[in-house]
């Protein structure tokens, strides 16, 4: 979302797992994004989602440490 809360469609969102780029998602007309990521091995992982910025928008990111216990498909999404 832009600073005035208007959506920013068509922007690339990078998804990293343990520092490796694993997916690139695109924001929809409403500025939200959604995607899935499969994890086949158990263990501790770090997921980071980054918006690199655009003409008038600053970069933004979020990071989470997750413990995978069994093979898992994770739904990644951001909503207003």
Image (spheres, helix red, strand yellow):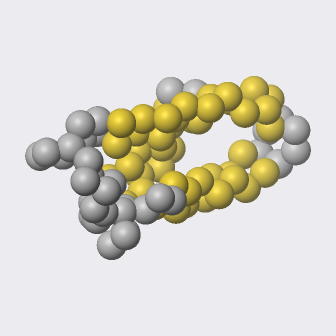
In the picture shown, does residue 54 fall above or below 78?
A: above
**Residue 21 appears in view:** no
In the picture shown, does residue 71 fall above or below 28?
A: above
Q: Is residue 22 left or right of residue 58?
A: right
The residue depicted at 75 percent of the width and 27 percent of the height is 44
Kindly indicate the quadrant of the structure image that contains residue 27. bottom left
The residue depicted at 36 percent of the width and 36 percent of the height is 60
Residue 6: x and y in percent read: 28, 62
Q: Is residue 13 left or right of residue 39?
A: left
Residue 68: x and y in percent read: 80, 37
The residue depicted at 23 percent of the width and 37 percent of the height is 58
In the picture shown, does residue 77 fall above or below 61?
A: below
Q: Residue furthest bottom?
A: 29
Kindly indicate the quadrant of the structure image that contains residue 29. bottom left
The residue depicted at 73 percent of the width and 55 percent of the height is 73
Q: Is residue 46 left or right of residue 34?
A: right
Q: Nearer the viewer, residue 41 or 49?
A: 49
Residue 15: x and y in percent read: 48, 43
**Residue 66 appears in view:** yes
Residue 56: x and y in percent read: 13, 45
In the picture shown, does residue 22 fall above or below 8?
A: above
Q: Residue furthest left?
A: 55
Q: Nearer the viewer, residue 73 or 33?
A: 33
């Amino acid at each position: 979302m832009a600073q005035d809360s208007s959506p920013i469609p068509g922007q690339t969102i990078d998804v990293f797992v343990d520092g490796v780029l694993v997916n690139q998602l695109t924001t929809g007309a409403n500025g939200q994004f959604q995607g899935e990521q499969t994890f086949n091995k158990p263990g501790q992982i770090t997921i980071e989602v980054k918006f690199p910025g655009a003409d008038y928008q600053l970069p933004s990111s979020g990071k989470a440490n997750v413990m995978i216990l069994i093979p898992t498909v994770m739904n990644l999404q951001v909503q207003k």
